[in-house]
Image: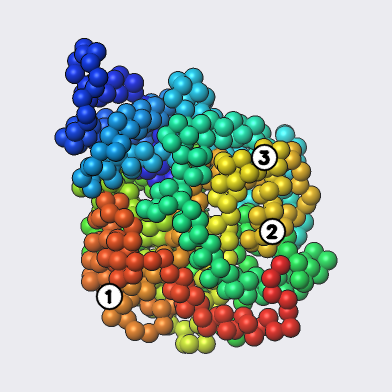
Amino acid sequence: MRIPSFRSRAISHLLSILVLVQLAQPQGSKRPQPKPTVDEARAFVDSAEKRLRNLWIKTSRASWVQSNFITDDTEALAADAQKEITAATVDFAKAAARFNGLKLPYDVERQLNLLKLSLSLPGPSHPAEQEEMTQISVSLESDYGKGKFFPDGPEGKGIDLTQASRTLAVSRNADTLLMMWKGWHSISPPMRKRYERLVELSNKGAKELGYRDLGAMWRSNYDMAPEQFSAEIERLWQQVRPLYEALHAHVRASLAKRYGETLVPKDGLIPAHLLGNMWAQQWNNIYELVAPPQGDPGYDLTEILKSKKVDELEMVRIGERFFVSLGFDPLPETFWKRSLFKKPADRDVVCHASAWSIDFHNDLRIKMCIEINDEDFSTIHHELGHNFYQRAYNQLSLLYQGSANDGFHEALGDAVALSITPEYLQQLGFIQKVPDASGDLGLLMKLALDKVAFLPFGLLIDQWRWKVFSGEVATADYNKSWWQLREKYQGVKAPVTRTESDFDPGAKYHVPASVPYTRYFLSTILQFQFHRALCREAGISGPLHLASVYNDKKAGEKLRKMMAMGQSRPWPEALEVLTGEKKLDATAIIDYFAPLKKWLDEQNKGRKVGY
Ligand code: X8Z
Ligand code: ZN
């Protein structure tokens, strides 16, 4: 998803920059510039904020219209707005170099640094290159949004991602699954050339700002040295890897039973089309193939939502009520008027779910093609988490309007969704009685297929992009290196031979949309830390997978306190406010799934674990 808050979108306006740079030097003077002062630096930040706020609002509006109504015209308008904000930000960032070496107050220094890091795609300063970059970037996202394939030839009916995903979730016919997988992956080869150029141009922009390449710039956004951040990620992955491998081994054995060992070799890689999801990133849709035989909780949320005729709007209302139960104010009336909840039948939209704060104040919206199922019920909480976060920090300076680090933004709503427990569903009137402890394994399995399965995927997209940006992966090897990483981390393989005329990374939204992805890996670790802390605050002592903080104002208050800090302080401080912990800590997710891990280890006796 994309949060068109300050952090994720591009800007520019040369005139304003000239004015600002002049601010720092005496008018018409040819004498050497006087030494910059702290007051000047402060004035510089203030004017940059003012200018950028206007540009961001304009860009958000243009992007909102483009994503809700994809046409050549809206694409051009969005690209234009993005070009402006890119140019302005780059110019500000360069002008700020004047204050390098000056001892600045904490806030001014932090704001200048955040300004430099605020673009996911920094542009080169050459106007023609800037224009080319923003056009490519907008066109890639639009092409993804419009993507369709035609299994019966160009005259036949087109299938889009929503339809293909529905089939991947429910079909157990390997041929049908393969057709959907191949079909969707046929939309991205036309992106490849443009993507190569995008890498070139955005790298150039990152270098102009003083970073080694765009990957290094992305890794510089975590209040620590970029190398230290890479090491943190590796540390966390090694911690959770045994849990992932245990799940992988059990799922592989179950799929081998269902589809045969020719298709699913017992100790090899799992073909990527059999896991119920286009990217094999979350496996909850194949729950019934891998469920513990005696562990079923006895209800299926998708079935309940359907049988109770809960519609898209009501699903969002239920999500909102959860946040309100924690003490947050209800969403504004405009949220309900302006959001997109249902896929329009008559036009192309970017269906990938996103949450927006258009005016950095109270014009909050989500854009989502909601399907009535448990996955989207969770995703609604995810998106609302973004909106409530955006509002919680809206009193801060624009440059502080973001989460402590980008993983926090992604984790917020997911942490809340971990409170969708059987007991909570009973309170909603969705189930009559809470299943007894024998249903626990099933509950844990269902959630592990979502969260644990996701971990290596959350990691590998940027492992690929970091190598692409640094040049370690040559353009001629884009697809090969993509599959090497998918095999190494996820233990899945391409279901059919791939070549360099494919561009499989482009079939995943965040690549054409240039949204950094390590945030989701971080989020998967963090959300369990948040949940553990919220439950502690609520005084809940039982097992965490049965614990819901619904209605708990104390837990809500703690959460709000962290959210209101935005990114004004280094993220470990924000983490400490909520959890008392200063480090990312995978023990929260590991402990949560410990009973399942024990069961998986028993199942896996005599099986190969690993790939
Ligand atoms: O993109 C998203 C959200 C919007 S920020 C729907 N997610 C990642 C994805 O779909 O790939 C949430 C989970 C991971
Ligand atoms: Zn998100």
Q: Nearer the viewer, mark 3 or mark 1?
A: 3
Separation (CA) of disc 3 from disc 1:
50 Å
Position in image of residue 144 (x %, y %): 57, 39
- Which amino acid type is shown beneath numbered disc 1? Glu
| Above or below, 578 relative to 43 | below
Q: Secondary structure at mark 1?
A: helix
| Above or below, 136 relative to 413 | above
Position in image of residue 309 (x %, y %): 45, 62
Q: Quadrant of residue 187?
A: top right
Q: Where residue 242 is drawn, which disc sits there?
A: none
The answer to whether residue 372 shows anywhere in this view is no
Q: Nearer the viewer, mark 2 or mark 1?
A: 2
Q: Where residue 487 is drawn, which disc sits there?
A: 2
Q: Horizontal placement of 65 versus 501: left or right?
A: left
Disc 3 residue crowd, few under 14, some 14–19, many 20+, Cα 10 Å:
few
> Quick one: label 3 or label 1, which is nearer the N terminus?
3
Q: Are marks 3 and 1 in contact (CB under 8 Å)?
A: no
Q: Are marks 2 and 1 in contact (CB under 8 Å)?
A: no
> Quick one: label 3 or label 2, which is nearer the N terminus?
3
Q: Where residue 474 is drawn, which disc sits there?
A: 3
Q: Quadrant of residue 556?
A: bottom left
Q: Nearer the viewer, residue 472 or 163?
A: 472
Q: Nearer the viewer, residue 349 or 25?
A: 25
Q: Quadrant of residue 157?
A: top right
Disc 2 residue crowd, few under 14, some 14–19, many 20+, Cα 10 Å:
some
Q: Nearer the viewer, residue 72 or 598?
A: 598
- Which amino acid type is shown beneath numbered disc 3? Ala
Q: Residue furthest bottom?
A: 437
Q: Image point 38% across, 41% down: which residue?
A: 117
Judging by the rendered image, the residue that carries numbered circle 1 is: 537
| Above or below, 263 relative to 77 | below
Separation (CA) of disc 3 from disc 2:
19 Å
